[in-house]
Every structure is written in structure tokens, then in C-alpha cells.
Amino acid sequence: YREGYNNPQVSDENLIGLSRARRPNNAIFVNFDDEGTPTEPLDAAVQNWKKVCTNPVDKKAEEELRKLFEVRPVWSRNAVKANISVHPDKLKLLLPYLAYYMLTGPWRSLWVRFGYDPRKHPEAKIYQVLDFRIRCGMKYGKRTQTTETLSLLSLSHTVSVHDLKQGLGTSGASGAKKSASSTYKLKESIYIFREGALPPYRQMFYQLCDLNVESLQKIIHRNDGTELECTERDGWCLSKTSDDLRDSMSLMIKQMIRSTRPALFSTTTSNEDGKEQLAYETGEEEDDEEEEEEEFKPSEGSENEMETEILDYV
């Protein structure tokens, strides 16, 4: 949150969609300042999942998600979708069966294992969320994907328990074709930030443990062992940690694009500070890039899936 930000007052007057029928997913929502921690799902959530868990594939997905929450207690939905293959509609029912959803604070928009309270564990700072946006001037045309993004492969090979717990994902390449077991898996780039690779969208929601760059991890861990208080703005991290991370990530992206695709940069005289601005290419090359875009669809529906995820449960 920015300095001086206050959560808006919630009332019937400023809520949208009150007349819409509530979706029967029965997730438990928790605000940062709520007391207590949910320890089990709602009965309705249990019943909903049992109704649709009718075949070995569904039971396997449940077992795999349980294992994910055992080694890492906090997950974004996109991170889950990059690690297990499950139909999106069934995942909407499975998540409330195993975890509760944080609405505000440093773990907002994330799913937390029942019984675990990140507000009480300083080590949970690695699971905090970072809202990162490419902060450059754009020439808005058709949304395009770069070859750097397209080269990132889906998570289709074995990951160690340590990797899952600490984040960082996997690396390397695999030429194998997509198997039936990874039908619904998203690409790793949807939740992991790596130096030298562009984010697939202009706005991304990363967990701090999934910023796979040593210099960024040093920023996150610079107060290890001296955490005194968990605040709604910064969690267990030092003040301004999110700002420092965004500055470093923006610089990495600018340097990477300047070295690989200098044509995207233009110096405009209209800028008061005279700084370079990043401009998306438009024109004849869009036809070729549009074909690439069809091959890479990391998320169904909204590009800001984590922003609108709550709409699936209200």
C-alpha cells in the first residue's frame, strides 16, 4: 500500500453485485486484522468437493494439492495451476476445501493452509505478495508476447520439496510434448520472476519466494532474525521493501529489453525528465507476433486473475 492508504469502509452502498446469486464455492475469507485462524473448511465446501471428486484424476489432484500445502503453506492460485493439472472449475472447489483466502494485508489474494497463520510466523514473509507493474510509457496496440516469454516451458518435470517450499521453481529445458497429466498446467512464468525473462503480463502478482534472483532475495531477507512486528503494509519485511523490489525488477527488465530488443526503446522530447520510455512495437511485425500469442495463453479470462479471483466466490 502507498503511504496514507486506508482500507475503504465496506457497506451495502459501495458493494457491487449484491443482487447476484452467491456462488456455491463456500470459501472462507480472512482480513488482516481479523482475529483467529480458520482450522477447517465449511461443511458446504466439503460437500461441494465430495460431489465432484468422482474419479482417480480428481483424487490425485487433491493429494497433490495437499502435498503442496504441506511443504509450502501459502500459494497463489496461478502458482497452484502451474504445479498440478486440474480442471479450473474443479480447482475453484478444491481450494476452499484445503485452505482459506486472505483478502487484505501482505498475503492478500493468496490461499493459506487451514491452521496456519502467517501473521504469527516471521518466516512467512517469503510468502508475501508483491504487486508488480511494468512502469513504462507504452504505445498501446495489440497485446503481444515476446520470444523470451514464449521460451519458458511449463513445469513438467520433478521439483524437490525444498524448491517448492522456498519458491524459485525449476530451470532447464524439456523438449517433451505436453502429456495428458499436464493438460491444465500453466507455464512457470505465470508466477516466477527470473532475471533475463519478461513477465507475461504488464501487471503481475508474485510471492516473494518466487522472485528467483539473488539480489532480490537479499532485499527480502535483510532483516532476518530481527523482525519485530507484522504490519498490514509491509508484513514481516522492512518498510519500503516492496518499493525497493519494484525498482530493482524494473531496472532488470529495462536492461534486458535494451540489450535484446533496442528498437522497443525511444527517447522522447515530450518527457520533462528526458528519460527513455519503453514502447511496444506496432505495425507489420504484429501479424507474426499475433500467431505467437495464440500459442501462449497462460491464463483463461482476465489477465489480472488474482485481482478478480474473489468474484469466483461471491
Image (cartoon, rainbow, N blue to C red):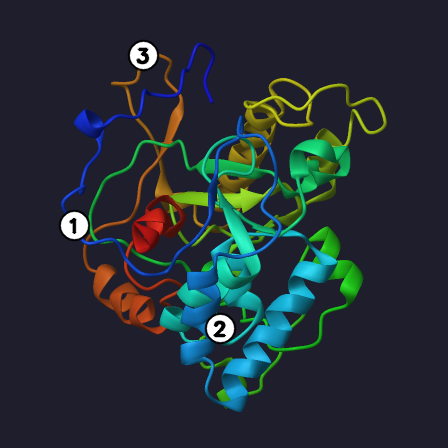
Residue 30: x and y, percent? 49, 39
Residue 149: x and y, percent? 47, 60
In front: label 2 or label 1:
1
Residue 171: x and y, percent? 68, 65
Q: Nearer the viewer, residue 149 or 257?
A: 149
Q: Is residue 177 visible?
A: no
What kind of residue is marked 1?
Arg
Q: Is residue 139 visible?
A: yes
In front: label 1 or label 3:
1
Q: Secondary structure at mark 1?
A: loop
Q: Earlier in the sequence, mark 1 or mark 3?
A: 1
Residue at x 37% of width, y 13% of height: 273
Q: Which residue is mark 2?
A: 185
Question: What's the CA distance linking mark 3 and mark 2?
Answer: 45 Å
How many residues crowd around disc 3 within 10 Å: few (fewer than 14), some, or many (20 or more)? few
**Res 25 quadrant in image:** bottom left
Residue at x 47% of width, y 32% of height: 104
Q: Secondary structure at mark 2?
A: loop
Residue at x 47% of width, y 81% of height: 53
What kind of residue is marked 3?
Glu
Q: Which of the numbered marks, if any, corresponds to residue 272?
A: 3
Q: Which residue is mark 1?
A: 20
